[in-house]
Amino acid sequence: PYLITLSSYVGVCYTVWNITMVATSPLYAENYGLNNLQIGLTYISNGTRSLCGSILTGKLLNIEYRRQLKRERKHVEDVTAVKEVKKIELVRIRPMIVPIALFIPCVVAFGWVVDYHAHIAVSITLAIFIGGLDTCILAAFLMLVVDLFQSQSFSVTAYMNLSHCLIAAGGTTVVQPLIQAVGVGWAFTTCASITLTTCPFATTKLYYGTRWRNKR
């Protein structure tokens, strides 16, 4: 259950990001009149946002790890005895509170910006934020499961990758019918709402994860 809930949340976030990329091409062609070359150029931001998100996540998690290690060493006489952080959930999830909080409104805003034909620069900027924030979330949670299952790191990483790709495959197949049924704005609002409902999977691990893990 511990790994399933984590993979479910990561899978939903990854799916929403993929939905954004899949829906971009027909939406930009229909709403902004872009040709294939112009649409392709808008995807250049994908690589940039992923790179920036990965670098930022690594730095944030390293800083938080050192801080948490100092906190835990304050409660022991021999600081050298504490070589690793015990409350690893705090280290990996706490720095992601802001990205998680920003991800959902960015998805909603993207949908309504495209729906109301706002300037394309706004939607591209929002897409950059969606991709960058999602990269941060994915990297942090993948690192968390590797920390939790160090002896099975290859297996759990493969499971996480497979699970969120399967969820994304299902999600991207329904995005176009959903847009046709309720419109762009409400379609992305629905995606954001689904993401919001899975947030407790992450927040409960933040506050109770260490306690539950110790009871196993």
Image: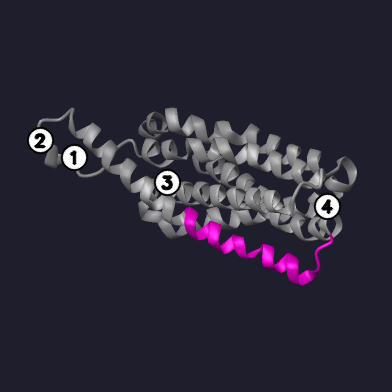
At horizontal 43% and vertical 50% (from top left) the residue drawn is 57
Residue to which mark 2 is pinned: 78
Q: Is residue 51 magenta?
A: yes
Please report the bounds of the magenta region as a residue range: 33-53
Which of disc 3 and disc 2 is earlier in sequence?
Answer: 2
Alpha carbons under labels 3 and 1: distance apart: 19 Å
At horizontal 25% and vertical 44% (from top left) the residue drawn is 84
Depth check, front residue: 89 or 213? 89
Query: Which residue type does callout 3 highlight?
Result: Leu
Dividing the picture into quadrants, the one containing residue 182 is: top right
Is 176 placed above or below 47 here?
above
Residues marked 1 and 2 touching at CB (< 8 Å): yes
User: Residue 198: percent from the left, percent from the top?
Assistant: 61, 35
Residue to which mark 1 is pinned: 82
Residue to which mark 4 is pinned: 176
At horizontal 78% and vertical 70% (from top left) the residue drawn is 36
Query: Which residue type does callout 1 highlight?
Result: Val
Query: Which residue type does callout 2 highlight?
Result: Asp
